[in-house]
Image (cartoon, helix red, strand yellow):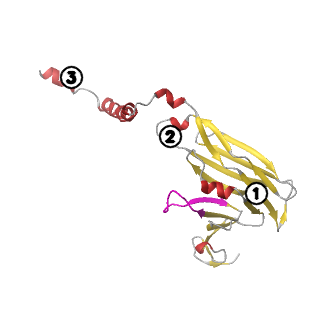
Amino acid sequence: MNKRRKSLFSFSPRFILLFLISSVIAFPILSQGVDMFGWFKKQEVFLSSEVNGVVTENGEPVANLKVIRSLIYTDQKVHKDTAVTDDKGHFHFPEKIIRSSNPNKPFAINRTSQEIYINKNGTLIPFWVATHVGIKELPEYKAKLAMLNCELTNKRVSFQFKNNYSEHVDHMASSICRWNEDYTPFLLYDGMNEYIVENGNFNKLTEQGTGREINI
């Protein structure tokens, strides 16, 4: 009797830990009847809404300017395309959708890094830098990307805009472009310096870390 009881409890702590982890992973899968082979099936993943923009410098349209869009999904594959501004400074990118099996994997994280920028004399000037969460199009992002008004003399700012799915957490992006609606800048960048934009007002700037009021 004692020998039998000893054999039942002679498993190593490492074995018990691995068994418990396997059980935690397997239970929700088996209880919901999930097909393991479904993990490898691909589905549509939305990376970017359609983009329209106009580039100006001192108010004048800039033609023949190369604009780059770089989209990096969770799988780390880079989807890059380019557009060239016309004589009115306008550029366009179509919406971007791929097919991926990543959303079907357990505990999958679905995020897309979105970057739209130009390379001016070796300096990257951002028209749009944001993280798109999920695999469906976000209406708030669609509205912002519908028209990028990009004046090259503008300073880059980080800003907030409405999140229709959460009244407590806004979306955030960074850009030199400006919008008339649903646009609250909170940080302005001038070279190596950062300035807090008080209440979204560019006329009320304080230096990050010092609180010193400045005018740019």
Name the N-terminal-most of marks 2 and 3. 3
Quarter of the image holding residue 61? bottom right
| Mark 1: secondary structure | strand
x 54%, y 61%: residue: 170
Q: Quadrant of residue 156?
A: bottom right
Please provide percent x and percent y for residue 74.
Answer: 58, 42
* Highlighted magenta segment, given as a residue range: 160-174
Looking at the image, which residue is at 70% across and 50% down?
Answer: 50
As measured in the structure, the alpha-carbon distance from the residue carrying label 2 to the one carrying label 3 is 39 Å
Task: Tell whether position 166 is magenta.
Answer: yes
Q: Nearer the viewer, mark 1 or mark 3?
A: 1
x, y (%) of residue 22? 37, 31
| Label 2 sits on residue | 108
Quadrant where the C terminus is found in the figure: bottom right
Q: In the figure, 51 relative to 59: above or below?
A: above
- Kindly identify which residue carries mark 3: 7
Q: Amino acid at mark 1?
A: Gly
Q: Which residue is mark 1?
A: 53
Query: Pointer 2: residues within 10 angstroms few (<14), some, or many (20+)?
Result: few
Q: Earlier in the sequence, mark 1 or mark 3?
A: 3
Q: Which residue is farthest right?
A: 87
Is the magenta region chiefly helix, strand or loop?
loop
Place residue 27 in its image quadrant.
top left
Residue extending farthest to the left is 1
| Type of amino acid at the residue the image marks with label 3 | Ser
